[in-house]
Image (cartoon, coloured by chain):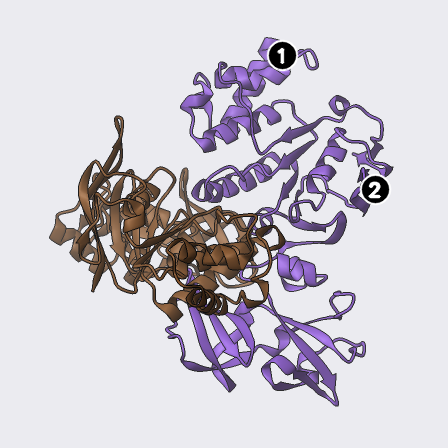
Chain colours: A purple, B brown
């Protein structure tokens, strides 16, 4: 997509959207409700036309090309299987339609292949109501696959599944995409899903693309405050910082750090900065300054300690073995090299 | 001191046994969370405690008094719902004051108690606003305030955070827990979200298909699940299950791929209990990718979470387990996994119960 603009009445859904989905890539478009994610997918598929800008598939400009001639397969959140048809007939349905008119021998061949890849061979003669949620999901995917589309467009396909099944489907979907070598363009509001599925993650907010990068890049080097806050759980800690005379003063914590240890960038920092630090980059039990344990949350695999320092509450991730009690005074240490700096006005990351 | 007691509580809707034989004591000041998938009977149990459903069998005691036949208004409980249920035409103040005014509490005392509750919840500056002018988090706080102002014997909460978006839910979860630490009100809380249960509860009551599966502290249910259901339901992802065949003490266990693994303590346990086929339960963080681990497999996918990577590893055809690794580098292809045996569980595949 190049410089795509889209407006619905007074709402500017997409602004100057330029994004490339590479061949064979699993690209996840991540953003909150109303960010413009679904609009993006609909523009790629041809269900919407952009007001301005171009859409290319395999290098060919698609503006004005009908959806059926773009050969994109859409997998929705509410996968709708025909309840009166068997799985086999559900899979055959798009191929038998007027649009594709495939002969039955070819249909059988393609369904057998897809069923083998999706491990649903034993389900072909069943009706949808005899399938589990995950199996239904696989059949819906299969129905998209039989057409050998150039791109799979997926609009929150896992969001209706319960948490346990979603975790399992994540692994299935990712390994399926690798095995098929297919191009997946996947939309979600769930940052864990985005991180775990995507080869690259594109973060969208209010119609504006914020950042495109590998999951690690987006997590460790967020382009701006929005991305930093949206990705990661619990959220990144933000503190006000004042660089002055070789020191970085963190007013909220009454701390002064050596600026040269925490700021490796070349540019001169503004007189006020926003300093971000992830919960796992604050270490408890070390360092010379002390906070008070305000709350301990056991998440199973690890714990989150909320540490009160003055009026500030820091979120700190600690191993599950660590024992802290509410009210306890604990020293803490910010891992110097993990501090991130943001411009407080533009909210862009510095350095 | 016992605040709520459920004795053999059961509820049938037609042929459907929604709740079966639930017996439980909730103690004064405790935060007890009923956790389970939809349809497990947790909300029905809560509604019976509230008096909104009549049990088919069994009894409910609140503060030592049998209340099974009493209407909700006479049980001295406060119910906080998922959809706040605030009066839209009333200010936050009026909403919180409502239950007191309905009881005919003198005006000055109403003023004092509403302000007191508003202070605890950090709502003082919002008291003049109507619900439509409040954020969803603040609306939920007003709903909480309305429950708190009555100083009930027990707070009953039915998924109070589920209407909030993920970030706000996280914040409210912490605030609610902190509030509980400060005011120490006896609370029974229902959720399907295991993270909520783990992070908030003093004790978790895991339910499935109308029955209690396990009652214990978050640590107990996480580390020592009593059955396969609890082991799978708690944790994200849940516990890994690896089928084993016990070969005899000194000989170890056979894996599905034909190789064997050894662990003296487990072998002893299997011997004592006369086990042959069993299931090894091990959480993803107690497995690690090692140079010479005990279980071999190949990496199916890597899921980066930023501060750690979650691997899916196939250890036998179709048998995929999850492994956590804190290292930044990504491993691929064939790997071997080291097991932290002290954190492993053993289950009986026929009954699904833990072998101890």
Residue occupying image coordinates x 47% and y 45%: A167
**Picture coordinates of residue B203, whole percent (x, y):** 30, 59
Q: Counting other residues with Cα less than 10 Å from the Cα at mark 1, is it few (<14), some (14-19), or many (20 or more)?
A: some
Q: Which residue is mark 1?
A: A96
Is residue B346 something one can see in this rendering?
yes
Label 1 residue SS: helix
Q: Which mark is residue B128?
A: none
Q: Chain of mark 1?
A: A
Q: Residue at x 52, y 20 (%)?
A: A112
Q: Residue at x 46, y 23 (%)?
A: A121
x then y, percent, for residue B149: 41, 61
Horizontal arrangement in the rendering, residue B267 relative to residue A250 (left or right): left
Judging from the image, what secondary structure is the residue with disc 2 in?
strand
Question: Is residue B170 visible to us here?
Answer: no
Quadrant including the C terminus of chain B: bottom left
Left or right of B74? Residue A322 is right
Q: Residue at x 63, y 76 (%)?
A: A337
Quadrant of the rendered image containing residue B337: bottom left
Left or right: where does residue B254 sit relative to residue B182?
A: left
The answer to whether A104 is drawn above or below residue A57 in the figure is: above
Residue placed under numbered mark 2 in the picture = A5
Residue at the far bottom: name it.
Answer: A245
**Residue B217 relative to residue B137: left or right:** left
Question: Where residue B274 sits: x, y (%)?
Answer: 12, 47
Q: Could you tell me how far apart the alpha carbons at marks 1 and 2 are, in whole angstroms?
A: 36 Å
Name the quadrant containing residue A153: top right
């Amino acid at each position: 997509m190049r410089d795509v603009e889209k407006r619905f009445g007074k709402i500017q859904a997409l602004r100057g959207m330029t994004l490339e989905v590479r061949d064979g890539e699993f690209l996840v478009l991540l953003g909150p409700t109303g960010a413009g994610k679904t609009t993006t997918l609909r523009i790629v598929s041809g269900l919407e036309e952009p007001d301005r800008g171009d859409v290319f598939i395999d290098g060919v400009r698609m503006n004005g090309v009908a959806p059926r001639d773009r050969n994109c397969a859409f997998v929705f959140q509410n996968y709708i299987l025909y309840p009166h048809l068997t799985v086999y007939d559900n899979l055959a349905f798009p191929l038998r339609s007027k649009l594709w008119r495939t002969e039955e021998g070819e249909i059988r061949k393609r369904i057998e292949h897809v069923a083998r890849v999706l491990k649903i061979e034993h389900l072909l003669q069943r009706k949808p109501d005899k399938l589990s949620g995950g199996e239904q999901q696989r059949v819906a995917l299969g129905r998209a696959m039989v057409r050998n589309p150039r791109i799979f467009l997926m609009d929150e396909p896992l969001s209706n599944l319960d948490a346990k099944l979603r975790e399992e489907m994540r692994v299935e979907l990712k390994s399926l995409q690798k095995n098929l070598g297919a191009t997946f363009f996947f939309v979600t509001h769930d940052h864990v899903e985005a991180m775990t599925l995507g080869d690259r993650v594109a973060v969208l907010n209010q119609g504006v693309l914020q950042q495109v990068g590998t999951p690690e890049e987006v997590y460790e080097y967020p382009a701006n405050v929005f991305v930093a806050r949206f990705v990661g759980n619990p959220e990144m800690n933000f503190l006000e910082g004042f660089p002055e005379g070789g020191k970085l003063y963190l007013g909220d914590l009454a701390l002064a750090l050596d600026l040269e240890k925490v700021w490796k960038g070349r540019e001169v920092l503004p007189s006020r900065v926003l300093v971000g630090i992830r919960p796992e980059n604050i270490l408890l039990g070390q360092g010379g300054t002390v906070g008070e344990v305000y709350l301990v949350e056991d998440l199973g695999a690890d714990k989150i300690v909320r540490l009160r320092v003055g009026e500030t509450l820091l979120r700190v991730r600690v191993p599950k073995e660590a024992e802290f009690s509410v009210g306890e005074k604990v020293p803490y240490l910010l891992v110097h090299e993990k501090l991130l700096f943001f411009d407080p006005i533009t909210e862009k990351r510095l350095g | 001191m016992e605040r709520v007691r459920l004795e053999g509580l059961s509820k049938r809707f037609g042929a459907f046994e929604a709740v079966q034989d639930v017996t439980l004591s909730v103690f004064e000041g405790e935060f007890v969370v009923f956790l389970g998938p939809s349809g497990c009977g947790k909300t029905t149990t809560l509604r019976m405690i509230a008096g909104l459903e009549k049990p088919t069998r069994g009894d409910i005691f609140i503060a030592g008094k049998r209340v099974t036949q009493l209407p909700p208004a006479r049980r001295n409980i406060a119910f906080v719902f998922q959809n706040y249920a605030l009066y839209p035409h009333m200010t936050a103040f009026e909403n919180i004051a409502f239950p007191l005014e309905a009881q005919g509490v003198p005006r000055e005392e109403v003023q004092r108690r509403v302000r007191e509750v508003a202070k605890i919840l950090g709502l003082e500056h919002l008291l003049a606003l109507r619900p439509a002018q409040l954020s969803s988090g603040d609306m939920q706080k007003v709903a909480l305030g309305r429950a708190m102002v009555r100083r009930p014997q027990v707070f009953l909460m039915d998924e109070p955070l589920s209407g909030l978006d993920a970030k706000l839910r996280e914040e409210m979860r912490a605030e609610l827990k902190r509030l509980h630490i400060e005011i120490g009100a006896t609370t029974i809380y229902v959720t399907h979200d295991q993270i909520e249960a783990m992070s908030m509860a003093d004790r978790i009551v895991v339910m499935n298909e109308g029955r209690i599966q396990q009652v214990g502290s978050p640590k107990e249910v996480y580390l020592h699940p009593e059955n396969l259901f609890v082991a799978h339901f708690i944790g994200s992802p849940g516990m890994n299950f690896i089928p084993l065949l016990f070969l005899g003490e000194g000989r170890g266990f056979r894996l599905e791929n034909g190789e064997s693994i050894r662990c003296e303590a487990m072998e002893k346990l299997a011997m004592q209990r006369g086990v042959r086929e069993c299931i090894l339960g091990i959480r993803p963080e107690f497995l690690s990718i090692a140079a010479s681990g005990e279980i071999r497999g190949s990496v199916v996918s890597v899921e980066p979470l930023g501060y750690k990577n979650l691997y899916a590893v196939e250890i036998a055809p179709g048998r995929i387990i999850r492994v956590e690794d804190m290292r930044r580098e990504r491993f691929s292809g064939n790997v071997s996994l080291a097991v932290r045996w002290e954190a492993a569980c053993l289950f009986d595949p026929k009954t699904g119960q833990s072998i101890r």
